[in-house]
């Protein structure tokens, strides 16, 4: 019986070492103050595009917790939330384009809606909707048809901020990551 050799995983992209994409990662300085708000479960997911963003941009990050609502409301008081436009009365489509502080939620769509329900401050934040809603995210099931991954939304936001080269570099890295992830999954190294 062959002995199974443990696989080493990259601490940045989380892929098996032989599939690591970090050498091809762009190094992007974002034009504004950008932060990712991770759902507590998202940070440990190997297919988290927010974690991938952290490895190739200067984006800040923190973890959401429903018991820290008061603290996080103060911390993000000047931020605009990147979130799809909805028809509810609290949602405004791109009311604060001149903002210098932007916040992304990194989670599944179900978790992000739960975070919104449990955090009134998130519901009440000014929202910026990305106009491009075409997603190429292939690593998860049950995706919203018009939903973007965190990385895609930041890349499309960069394009809307007139930073097309950085946007394209991120999207190319994202596709490279997905291909490597799917190969590693096919080879039985990822679930």
Image (cartoon, rainbow, N blue to C red):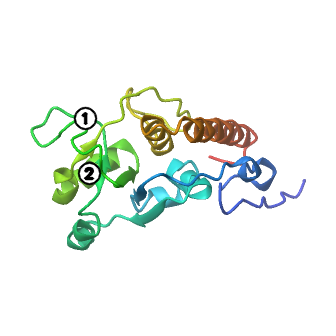
**Name of the residue lying farthest toward the left:** 89
Query: Between 164 and 43, which is closer to the camera in this rendering?
Result: 164
| Residue occupying the point 23% across, 63% down | 77
Query: Between 63 and 2, which is closer to the camera in this rendering?
Result: 63
The earlier-in-sequence mark between 2 and 1 is 1
Residue 54 placement (x, y as % from top left): 55, 58
Query: Between 10 and 55, which is closer to the camera in this rendering?
Result: 55
Location of mark 2 (residue) = 114
Where residue 103 sits, quadrant-wise, is bottom left
Q: Is residue 94 left or right of residue 60?
A: left
Q: Is residue 32 left or right of residue 89?
A: right
- The answer to whether 105 is drawn above or below residue 66 in the figure is above
Q: Residues within 10 Å of mark 2 (few under 14, many from 20)?
A: few
Location of mark 1 (residue) = 85
Q: Is residue 44 left or right of residue 102?
A: right
Disc 2 to disc 1: CB gap under 8 Å: no
| Residue occupying the point 38% across, 31% down | 144
- The answer to whether 96 is drawn above or below residue 137 in the figure is below
| Residue occupying the point 38% across, 51% down | 104
Secondary structure under tag 1 reads loop
- The answer to whether 7 is drawn above or below residue 87 in the figure is below
Secondary structure under tag 2 reads helix
Instruction: Tell us which disc is closer to us: 2 or 1.
Output: 1
Query: Between 175 and 138, which is closer to the camera in this rendering?
Result: 175
Residue 60 placement (x, y as % from top left): 46, 63
Label 2, label 1: how many angstroms apart (C-alpha)? 17 Å
Q: Residues within 10 Å of mark 1 (few under 14, many from 20)?
A: some
| Residue occupying the point 83% across, 57% down | 4
């Amino acid at each position: 019986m062959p002995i199974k050799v443990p696989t080493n995983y990259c601490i940045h992209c989380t892929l098996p070492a032989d599939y690591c994409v970090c050498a091809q990662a762009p190094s992007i300085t974002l034009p504004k103050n950008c932060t990712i708000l991770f759902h507590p479960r998202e940070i440990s997911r190997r297919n988290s595009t927010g974690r991938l963003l952290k490895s190739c941009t200067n984006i800040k990050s923190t973890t959401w917790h429903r018991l820290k609502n008061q603290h996080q409301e103060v911390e993000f008081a000047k931020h605009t939330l990147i979130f799809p436009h909805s028809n509810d009365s609290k949602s405004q489509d791109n009311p604060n384009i001149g903002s210098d502080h932007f916040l992304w939620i990194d989670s599944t769509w179900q978790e992000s809606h739960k975070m919104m329900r449990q955090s009134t401050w998130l519901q009440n934040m000014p929202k910026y909707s990305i106009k491009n809603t075409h997603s190429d995210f292939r690593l998860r099931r049950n995706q919203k048809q018009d939903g973007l991954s965190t990385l895609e939304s930041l890349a499309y936001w960069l394009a809307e901020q007139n930073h097309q080269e950085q946007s394209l570099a991120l999207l190319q890295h994202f596709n490279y990551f997905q291909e490597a992830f799917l190969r590693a999954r096919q080879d039985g190294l990822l679930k």
